């Protein structure tokens, strides 16, 4: 059986915890399990490895 569900789509961005600028994905993937994605702040150079690549698209079920 196929059931249709209406969803709301969001684009999520990750911002630097040091200066607040939007972090840039470095373009490499660390092949650990689970995979990890290095990001760098273009303003202050802060680096952080995340478990998701940003920006990311997220879908949530619409209620009602």
Image (cartoon, helix red, strand yellow):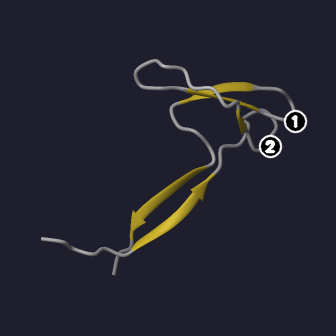
- Residue 1 placement, left or right of 18: left
* SS label for mark 2: loop
Q: Is residue 11 above or below residue 23?
A: below
Q: Which residue is mark 2?
A: 21
Comparing 2 with 41, the one in front is: 2
- State which tag comes first along the sequence, 2 or 1: 2
**Residue in view at x 31 percent, y 73 percent:** 5
Q: Which residue is mark 1?
A: 43
Residue 26, given in percent of the width and then of the height, sits at 70, 30
Where residue 64 sits, quadrant-wise, is bottom left
**Residue in view at x 46 percent, y 70 percent:** 8
Q: CA distance from mark 2 to mark 1?
A: 7 Å
Mark 2–mark 1 CB contact (< 8 Å): yes
* SS label for mark 1: loop
Residue 44, given in percent of the width and then of the height, sits at 86, 30
Residue 30, given in percent of the width and then of the height, sits at 54, 20
Quadrant in which the N terminus is drawn: bottom left
Where residue 45 sits, quadrant-wise, is top right
Q: Is residue 59 above or below residue 45?
A: below
Q: Is residue 7 above or below residue 55?
A: below
Q: Residue furthest bottom?
A: 64
Q: Residue furthest top?
A: 32
Comparing 55 with 2, the one in front is: 2
């Amino acid at each position: 059986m196929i059931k249709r569900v209406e969803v709301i789509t969001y684009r999520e961005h990750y911002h630097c915890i040091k200066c607040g600028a939007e972090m840039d994905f470095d373009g490499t993937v660390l092949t650990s399990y689970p995979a990890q994605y290095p990001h760098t702040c273009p303003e202050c150079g802060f680096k952080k490895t995340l478990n998701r690549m940003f920006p990311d698209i997220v879908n949530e079920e619409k209620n009602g």
